Image: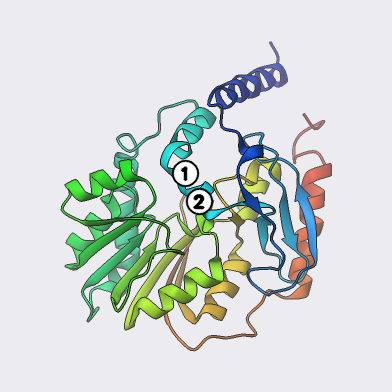
Amino acid sequence: MGEDSAAREAREVRRSRIEALGFAYAAAPKREVESCNLCGEARFVVLTHRDRYGYPASAHGCTRCGLVFLNPVMTAGAYAAFYAETYRPLVSAYHGRRIDAETIQAEQADYACERGDLLEPFARSLATRTLLDVGGSTGVVAAELSRRFDLRATVLDPSPRELAHASARGLEAIAGLLESWEPGERRFGLVTLCQTVDHLLDLAGALAKVRRMLAADGLLFADIVDFRAAYLRHWSVEEAVKIDHPYSLTDETMTALLQRGGFEVLRRDYAADHLHVSFVCRPCAPQSSGLPAAAAVEALWREVRLVQNAPAPGAGVRP
């Protein structure tokens, strides 16, 4: 059997595993996105009609700033149910191995140590000794950072199964989404969005909320899956889009969101996997003019079209 035939067979097996879940994405409640969450414009280009799982998910790009997002996108209620019941089984079906609250903890432990190393020069001197880990899953990362930097940690996550592990670690565990959670007068010295920003439903609103709850001398950590790195790695735009990521961010669009949200980037880190980009930030005055250059946005769309239509580098023909 040739390599192309093997690849086609593997894709068919993967498709069958995903279909067996019975998740009716097309029927899930959704809302139309009328304006860009980054720049507010309403001129979009349609990039994809399906995501990596094969669901009929349409990804749009803002022609002004280059932000890429699902449109229409599932409602907050639909996403809450999705994360509680479907998310981990779907990722397991995609990769062909069990990925759940038990199996992910070893990987999270390695990740936590790496994030601790990155934050080390900044987090030691925090005056406010509290941590909020948004999308904190089983609490592995929060536990490591709280131990390392002597912080009192809170984990916010929509999955009750994963939060049970966080509670077992002695952490404060809160079920919910950042957009709907109300912190009251609470302030945090460190807010982390570890592999979480892409999952948010309102980037600008969420970052504004983080800015308000962050102590004046506090730190924000966030990392993204770089959309460009993903589609260039797979030479497929569809493979870089997935329903669990309402937004597909680039280095440029994330930087602009941080600037406009009132955050100064202290350190940027390109991960060893060549896919993730990390940002360590502190509060500053919002920069309302912070947007990717028009020429960079045009170059992004040209590259997307190249990937959609040209053979992958080194390939004789496109599969």
Q: Quadrant of residue 161?
A: top left
Q: Quadrant of residue 284?
A: bottom left
Question: What residue appears at the point 29 percent right and 61 percent down from the top-left corner?
Answer: 116
Question: What residue appears at the point 75 percent right and 43 percent down from the top-left corner?
Answer: 49
Question: What's the amino acid at mark 1?
Answer: Ala
Position of 194 with respect to 249 (left or right) is left
Q: CA distance from mark 2 to mark 1?
A: 6 Å
Picture coordinates of residue 258, whole percent (x, y): 52, 74
On the image, numbered disc 1 is attached to which residue?
81
Determine crowd level at label 2: few under 14, some 14-19, many 20+ residues with C-alpha closer than 10 A: few
Picture coordinates of residue 138, whole percent (x, y): 29, 47
Q: Quadrant of the N terminus?
A: top right
Q: Quadrant of the C terminus?
A: top right
Picture coordinates of residue 286, whole percent (x, y): 53, 86
Question: What's the amino acid at mark 2?
Answer: Gly
Label 2 element class: helix
Residue 233 visible in rendering: no
Position of 274 with respect to 304 (left or right) is left
Residue 37 visible in rendering: yes
Picture coordinates of residue 272, whole percent (x, y): 46, 51
Determine crowd level at label 1: few under 14, some 14-19, many 20+ residues with C-alpha closer than 10 A: few
Label 1 element class: helix
Q: How is the image coloured?
A: rainbow
Q: Among all residues in the image, which is located at the extreme top?
A: 1
On the image, numbered disc 2 is attached to which residue?
77
